[in-house]
Amino acid sequence: MERTVTLIIATYNWPDALRLCLLSVEAQTQLPNEVIIADDGSGPKTKALVDLFQSSFPIPIKHVWQEDSGFRKSRIVNQAFALASFEYVIQVDGDVFLHHDFIKDHIRAAKPNFLLQGSRVMLGARYSEKLLMSGIPKFNLFAADTKRLENAIRLPFLSDYLLQRYRNRYPIYFARGANMSFWKEDLYAVNGYNESYQGWGHEDSDLTLRLMNYGVSKAVIKFAAIVYHLHHTEIKTPEQESKNKAIMEHTLKQKIHWTENGINKYL
């Protein structure tokens, strides 16, 4: 049976980057069944862009928006999870664009009782600016200011072999939401993101950890499901990141899988 997929794109006030992301979705060899834009308070330029794409996109685009009140990714992505119509959820950020086989690779790797974490190619400032000016989401392997270039190599057979074998230097629950996928029923079983996370940091790892505490295993996709991350400066508040880390450490020590502050308020 063909797998049905919701693609969620988290964005905030960067319509030029979101445009590249949506163009790369449109060019997929295997389209998702729907796209949901999880918008953490962007201004009218983002709405105008989404309206334009909605008018001609080959699949439905939903746009869920909340008022800008600081970094509240957990809250807006939970609202997107609640709107998801299909069984499998792939999540990216709006500051990446996708390899044309990205959706196909996630679907191929998906297995019951697993969540997937993909990798990113990190584009430099000069090359990112060039792409944004061109308006064309096309990666050049020889771009001078690119990091993690090994993540740009697509080798599906090697990817399949490494799927449950690959380990890196981070704890197994470490995660970044720019390239992840889940079964919707698993997300609902842990009540999605913990909205107690405010500001940047650790919300993706907390979700991954609670899913693992629930009994879901994590697998890492290498050499497939590629995203290209546009350069920007990360705004981190050390005090808030410390508070977020304390929440995650409590989740780890207490083996928590359910959050009271999650999806269920939107269902």
Image: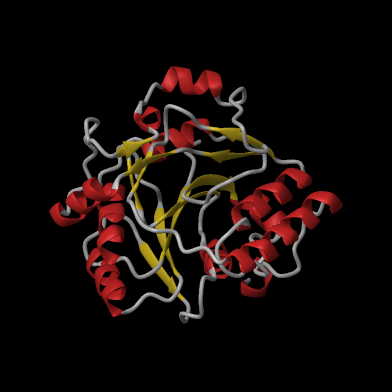
**What is the image's colouring?**
secondary structure
Picture residue at 27% right of the left edge, 71% below the top: 51
Asked if 236 appears above or below 142 in the picture, the reply is: below
Res 206 quadrant in image:
bottom right
Q: In the current view of this chain or complex, which residue is farthest to the left? A: 134
- Looking at the picture, tell me which residue is in the foreground, 189 or 217: 217
- Looking at the picture, tell me which residue is in the foreground, 211 or 52: 211
Q: In this image, 60 relative to 191: left or right?
A: left
- Looking at the picture, tell me which residue is in the foreground, 178 or 58: 178
Total numbered labels: 0
Which of the image's four quarters has the C terminus? bottom right
Q: Where is residue 235 in the image (x, y as percent from the top left)?
A: 46, 64
Asked if 144 appears above or below 52 in the picture, the reply is: above
Res. 257 in view: no
Q: Position of residue 83 (x, y in %)?
A: 52, 65
Picture residue at 29% right of the left edge, 68% below the top: 50
Picture residue at 51% right of the left edge, 70% below the top: 71
- Looking at the picture, tell me which residue is in the foreground, 105 or 32: 105
Q: In this image, 204 relative to 26: left or right?
A: right
Q: In this image, 50 relative to 136: left or right?
A: right
Q: Where is residue 233 in the image (x, y as percent from the top left)?
A: 39, 58
Picture residue at 77% right of the left edge, 59% below the top: 258
Res 17 quadrant in image:
bottom left
Res. 118 in view: yes
Res 121 quadrant in image:
top left
Asked if 38 appears above or below 219 in the picture, the reply is: below
Q: Where is residue 264 in the image (x, y as percent from the top left)?
A: 68, 69
Q: In the current view of this chain or complex, which residue is farthest to the right? A: 254
